[in-house]
Image (cartoon, rainbow, N blue to C red):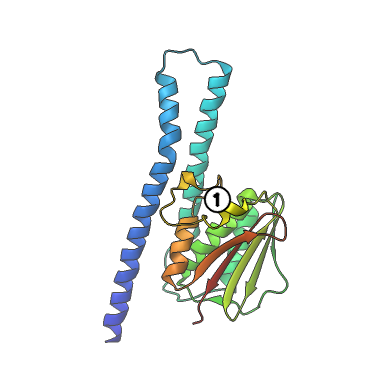
Amino acid sequence: KAPIAQLNTLLDEHELRQQRSRESLANFSHAIRTPLTAVMQALRSKRALDETRRTRILERLDDIDEKLESELRHSRIAGQSTGQQHTGMAEVTSMLEMFRTLYPDRVFVLDDTSVVDFRMPLERQDGMEMLGIVLDNAGKWARQRIELTLLAAPCRLKLDDDGPGVPDAMLERLGQRGVRLDEQYHGHGLGLSILAQLAERYGGRVTYDRSRLGGLRVEITLPPF
């Protein structure tokens, strides 16, 4: 029975990853379609490209490039599944080092109140993906400092940054299902819907608030093992 149960779990994991991949691709396609259409229309127009229109085209292309780079970074974060049924301090440390390299002008700090034997009840690939989403989002928008705090009982991960943050009225919409990426607050749409789906799958939740550093606080709460 045990091998059959393991096989069923593996098949379920594969199906869920395929579904997430399809949703991510659909969202990404929608996100770049608008700027791409605008660029194509501008180039097909018979109007001369003055400096204003040229600047707008470059802004659209920069937007597309930014989304492509973000998606490529997310695809590299999780790596291959190892079958490991938890995500621990080794993975957290590895991810922090990776993002210190990706964002050398940012300071990523593990808060000294964090528990040493921290473990998230997540399959390793899912845990790495969740960590990658929140760290990448903070690294992109922080002015300088990002603080990660790891707590137990219940298992919680808090990430604070000193960036511009998000208006209070928009906080509850971040990561909301059914809200398209380009309808969310600029800069915080990519990945947050996936983050919410991952947390929900494990019986957890993601909440957003104003950070004590002045920017955004992301808090992930997960049930015990």
Q: Is residue 15 left or right of residue 60?
A: left
Give residue 121's position: percent from left, percent from top. 49, 76
* Viewer-nearest residue: 132 or 50: 50
Q: Is residue 138 left or right of residue 13?
A: right
Q: Which residue is mark 1?
A: 188
Marker count (numbered): 1
Q: Does 182 appear above or below 221?
A: above
Q: Residue furthest front?
A: 169
Q: Which quarter shows the N terminus? A: bottom left
Residue 125 seen in this snapshot:
no
Q: Residue furthest bottom?
A: 1
Tell me what residue is drawn at x 34 percent, y 53 percent.
22
Give residue 125's position: percent from left, percent from top. 45, 66
* Viewer-nearest residue: 62 or 215: 215
* Viewer-nearest residue: 7 or 57: 57
Q: Does 46 appear above or below 209?
A: above
Q: Does 115 appear above or below 190?
A: below
Give residue 157's position: percent from left, percent from top. 59, 69
Tell me the kind of residue under disc 1.
His
Give residue 166's position: percent from left, percent from top. 62, 51
Q: Element under label 1? A: loop
Instruction: Give the class, few, some or many, for how many residues have Cα within 10 Å of label 1's Cα (few <14, many ≥20).
Output: many
Q: Is residue 63 left or right of residue 117?
A: left
Tell me what residue is drawn at x 67 percent, y 74 percent.
114
* Viewer-nearest residue: 101 or 27: 27
Residue 131 seen in this snapshot:
yes
